[in-house]
Image (tube, helix red, strand yellow):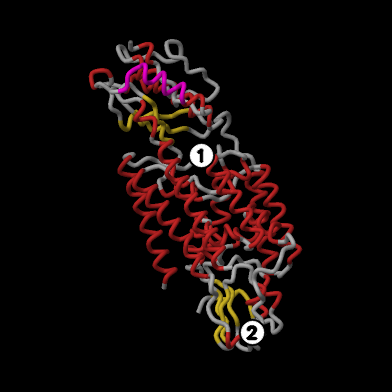
Amino acid sequence: MFKRNIALIVAVLFIAGIGSSLVRHRGISPGGTVVKAAGYGGVISLEMNRGPDGSITELILLDHNETPSCINDPANFLKQFSGKKAQDALALGKDIDGITGATVTSRAITDAVRATLKSEKLTTGKINPWNIILPLALLALALFALFLRSPLLRWAAMTAAGLYLGFISKAMFSLAQAANASLLHFPLFAVNSLWWMTLALSIIPAFIIGRLYCSSLCPFALIQELLARIPKKQTRSPQNLPVELQKTSSVLPYAHVKYLILIIVLALCFILGDTSAANIEVFITFFTGRGLPLAWVTLTLALTASVFYGHFWCRYLCPAGALLGTCASLAPLKIRAAHGCNSCGACLNICPVEAITAQGTSVEINNAECLLCGKCLRACSKNILALRKRS
Amino acid sequence: MKRSLSLLIISGCTLMALQIGVNIRLQHADPVAITETVSPAQIIALRSELEAKGLALYPALYWNEVK
């Protein structure tokens, strides 16, 4: 019931984000980029649309606080940007004629458009096929690992994803990505196909089977899994009690914290109309090496805590994981136990995120928390756990 | 165990809340800097202050042209 309510709240926030974006930007189309320029009287907002080759097809003035007499007919000025690419110098006075009597405004718009084009490296519209093939191969490997119950294949998928998505491409599913999608801020597929692929790799499996991305494809999960293997003094006593005595995990309520963070961040993104509130994920700092001092402190805390509490970030604080967990709670497939449990408790003891609870001989797996690591499938001596249709 | 875990989670949440605050402030700082009530001298001072922190006014302002 709790997960259903969270799913409802998240869905409402997403719809609100999309609605507000449509209202704010008057129906901005996918592929359009909002360009903000520092004009004479404040921020000038423009929508920049581009063709497949990355050249500007249209520049639309959305909002401004300039002196009306200076910018009452911007159409002729903005028309000059059509066909311009990242390679073009866009020099005011040479390539672009300024608006008479509004040099600051003209220069601000020209500079902002040039900076946006350069920052997105729109040098070519050609799609790199490896950005599609490799993520799909990783997904296939993760699925094989799950269905074949092979820890070796899972480690292969995790390592390959950690190297490719984390260290090489630095393209991971993040809350900022989801927030951008909710505000209809999409990059062109030709320009940033990995953005689309990581979104698809994480969201689509989550809606069908659960958090496969979290277990086998998330680069930061690999780091946490490695940290959890550092030998240490036992902090969590094995639950060797008969299953009849097992109760709901005592630390599971802490897992709800990440849903709270998710809701607050999405609400802030919706209210502010941008994704500044969503840039809080430590794995971005870890793999890109960039971040505010606060981000580095949070990263240090997450890494240290992961040594003592396995998957600390995934279990308690990761808002992106919470979003995927919310999707997973609606998935038609989940790990379920057939009849015949002998109450050995092996699955409860091995689950790294304590997503399994049992009462008597009835075993229940919390799909929103389950990382689909497959350890319980291999640990079950009666082989009664499997991916089945939700009842 | 539960106490140390609680402390870690609370610390993590506090740090993330501070990060959200700083991110929002940074994102929405520019409009404050470029309203008409801010003088060219203040802009120059703000630019120096930001540059000292490794930040920059984005995009560049051209107050020398409106003096």
Residue that carries the numbered disc 2 in the rendered image: A241
Q: Residue furthest right?
A: A152
Q: Position of residue A139 (x, y in %)?
A: 64, 57
Residue at 42 percent of width and 70 percent of height = A2
Type of amino acid under label 2: Leu
Q: Chain of mark 1?
A: A
Q: Is residue A197 visible from the viewing direction of this image? A: no
Q: Is residue A317 visible from the viewing direction of this image? A: yes
Report the front residue among A129 and A221. A221
Report the front residue among A50 and A212. A212
Q: Which residues are magenta?
A: B38-49
Residue at 39 percent of width and 13 percent of height = A97
Q: Is residue B42 magenta?
A: yes
Q: Position of residue A101 (x, y in %)?
A: 30, 12
Q: Quadrant of the C terminus of chain B?
A: top left
Q: Is residue A190 magenta?
A: no
Q: Residue furthest front?
A: B3
Q: Quadrant of the N terminus of chain B?
A: bottom right
Report the front residue among B26 and B15. B15
Q: Position of residue A274 (x, y in %)?
A: 40, 42
Q: Residue furthest left?
A: A69
Q: Are marks 2 and 1 on the same chain?
A: yes
Which-is-in-front pick, marks 2 and 1?
2
Q: Tell me the SS state at disc 2.
A: loop
